[in-house]
Image (cartoon, coloured by chain):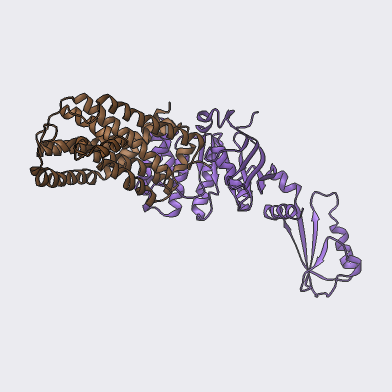
Chain colours: A brown, B purple
């Protein structure tokens, strides 16, 4: 294990984050506050309690998931896309490192950043609504797993993308709709039966549901299935990354 | 002694079907400076990229320090430092951080004293906190060299290091390479500037269309193919060569003012005495004599042309 290399990549990526700390901090706080003003206060005041919690509190886990997923993807995809864009990827390819070490460095840093954003949003949300966290350990586990798996997913997108447009394409066309339709702002049980069935094919439903369960104890799907789903997604992404480095797809001639 | 870099029957065919390397064999000895000469598109960069692991070989093996660069890639790669042809640096990183990154990637613990030595040697010390995007082109190239030396490699690859660099940097670079040689570091550089190879290399390899045409000691190569030219300036121009002098090795310049005689310095007889006697017999008055030695460039152009004709 080339631990120095993992550390070198991780530190470099984290320094990039700290250089733009103000941006990294302000934008999630601002967007979360806006969501609370619009959904929590303006619209939420007209919505009854969902699953026994106020609407403002109900959307907190979904909001955190929304930001964490998009941040994880954009951090990780940019982190591995940019070296390919500037050509500096050559030194990662020639260094005595294997795929796991590269992934640990890049994905570890991207996941750390996403986790940081998630915690910031949680803190911001606590200013607006009364939060309760029934299962704090499960909450942390869901948060960390989501940060990791979506950073892995972003890493794959970053290797796949040939230009900046493609880098935005997948998050915009697939991830955002999945997250919005994944029960971040509503309970799946509020949907007509047909859409409930369709929603079961959306992986984000399992994440949001499990995460919300760790807060309020109520879930759309059993929490065990949520855990299996996210573990499966993480494994799938890892396998894809392994395949990429094995075959050299898009990174080695 | 086993070679520090051993390339055997290395082939590379790109997805498009282009055959960049056609079975390259190359043994590089520890501590030598090898110059790989070749025209653009000869396969120089592909060869280096394949040894270093950027490109995957279609067939054949590479061993660095005795370690296979695929099955034992950690130990093989840890010995290598690479300075790529294109300048590639992350624009927002400082010089110090980007050099530290390379050292870490190569699995070496932090060593500020070593980095300081490398940066000072390359006149980069006062730029260590500058972002790479603030540097001039020559400075960026110095940073690339510093990165390659950050982990004290045993084998250094310089892919066309002096393309577009000024005299100062070129001199510094050669000074660095010579110092590395004293420490036993092996250097492989590619170039299409022949003077470069002539100035610094111990051995010269010529590569063309994915094949190594020859690898030879620089002195031997130059001696073996050394031809000299004797130029005889005449007092009075002549329209034609006198019949008595006509021969393969002698020709008249276009204006008729001088004769050029080509001869081989390694031959038993150069034929100069006979030529001069014949000249005076023909009644041609000589104004001046001068000789020129063929440079490596002439040799190289000769080689590549010969192959083209074949």
> Which is nearer the eye, B229 or B210?
B210
- The percent coordinates of residue B163 (x first, y second) are 53, 53
> Which is nearer the eye, B107 or B256?
B107
Which residue reaches farthest front? A193
Residue at horizontal 42 percent and vertical 42 percent from the top? A159
- The percent coordinates of residue A112 (x first, y second) are 28, 34
Residue at horizontal 23 percent and vertical 32 percent from the top? A209
Residue at horizontal 48 percent and vertical 38 percent from the top? A93
- The percent coordinates of residue A100 (x first, y second) are 42, 30
Q: Quadrant of the N terminus of chain A?
A: top left
Residue A6 in view (yes/no) = yes
Residue B289 lies in quadrant: bottom right
Residue B110 in view (yes/no) = no
A206 vs B223: above or below: above
> Which is nearer the eye, B59 or A241?
A241
Q: Is residue B220 left or right of residue B249?
A: left
């Amino acid at each position: 294990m080339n631990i120095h290399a993992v550390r070198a990549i991780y530190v470099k990526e984290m320094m990039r984050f700290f250089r733009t700390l103000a941006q990294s901090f302000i934008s999630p706080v601002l967007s979360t506050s806006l969501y609370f003003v619009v959904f929590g206060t303006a619209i939420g005041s007209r919505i009854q309690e969902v699953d026994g919690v106020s609407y403002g509190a109900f959307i907190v886990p979904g909001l955190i998931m929304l930001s964490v997923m998009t941040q994880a993807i954009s951090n990780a995809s940019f982190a591995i896309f940019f070296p390919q864009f500037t050509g500096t990827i050559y030194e990662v390819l020639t260094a005595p490192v294997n795929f796991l070490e590269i992934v640990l460095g890049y994905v570890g840093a991207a996941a750390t950043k996403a986790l940081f954003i998630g915690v910031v949003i949680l803190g911001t949300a606590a200013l607006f609504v009364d939060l309760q966290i029934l299962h704090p350990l499960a909450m942390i586990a869901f948060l960390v797993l989501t940060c990791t798996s979506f950073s892995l997913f972003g890493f794959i997108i970053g290797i796949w993308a040939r230009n900046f447009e493609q880098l935005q394409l997948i998050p915009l066309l697939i991830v955002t709709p999945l997250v919005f339709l994944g029960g971040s702002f509503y309970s799946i049980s509020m949907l007509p039966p047909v859409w409930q069935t369709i929603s079961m094919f959306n992986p984000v439903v399992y994440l949001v549901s499990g995460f919300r369960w760790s807060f309020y104890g109520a879930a759309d799907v059993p929490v065990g299935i949520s855990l299996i789903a996210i573990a499966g997604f993480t494994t799938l992404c890892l396998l894809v990354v392994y395949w990429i480095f094995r075959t050299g797809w898009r990174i080695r001639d | 002694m086993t070679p520090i870099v051993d390339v055997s029957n290395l082939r590379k065919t790109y997805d498009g079907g282009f055959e960049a390397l056609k079975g390259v064999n190359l043994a590089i000895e520890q501590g030598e400076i090898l110059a790989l000469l070749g025209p653009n598109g000869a396969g120089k960069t592909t060869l280096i990229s394949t040894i270093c692991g950027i490109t995957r070989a279609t067939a054949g093996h590479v061993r660095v320090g005795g370690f296979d660069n695929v099955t034992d890639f950690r130990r093989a790669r840890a010995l290598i430092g690479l300075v790529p042809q294109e300048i590639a640096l992350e624009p927002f990183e400082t010089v110090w951080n980007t050099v530290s990154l390379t050292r870490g990637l190569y699995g070496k613990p932090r060593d500020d004293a070593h980095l300081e030595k490398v940066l000072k040697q390359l006149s980069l010390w006062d730029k260590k906190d500058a972002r790479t995007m603030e540097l001039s082109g020559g400075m960026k190239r110095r940073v690339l060299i510093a990165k390659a030396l950050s982990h004290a490699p045993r084998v250094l690859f310089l892919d066309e290091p002096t393309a577009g660099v000024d005299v100062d940097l070129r001199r510094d670079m050669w000074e660095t390479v010579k110092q590395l040689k004293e420490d036993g570091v092996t250097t492989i550089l590619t170039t299409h500037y022949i003077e470069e190879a002539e100035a610094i290399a111990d051995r010269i390899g010529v590569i063309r269309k994915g094949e190594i045409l020859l690898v030879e000691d620089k002195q031997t190569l130059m001696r073996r193919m050394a031809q000299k030219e004797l130029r005889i300036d005449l007092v009075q121009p002549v329209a034609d060569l006198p019949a008595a002098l006509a021969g393969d090795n002698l020709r008249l310049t276009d204006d008729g003012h001088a004769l050029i005689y080509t001869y081989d310095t390694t031959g038993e007889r150069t034929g100069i005495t006979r030529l001069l006697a014949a000249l005076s017999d023909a009644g041609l008055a000589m104004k001046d004599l001068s000789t020129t030695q063929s440079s490596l460039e002439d040799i190289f152009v000769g080689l590549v042309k010969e192959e083209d004709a074949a």
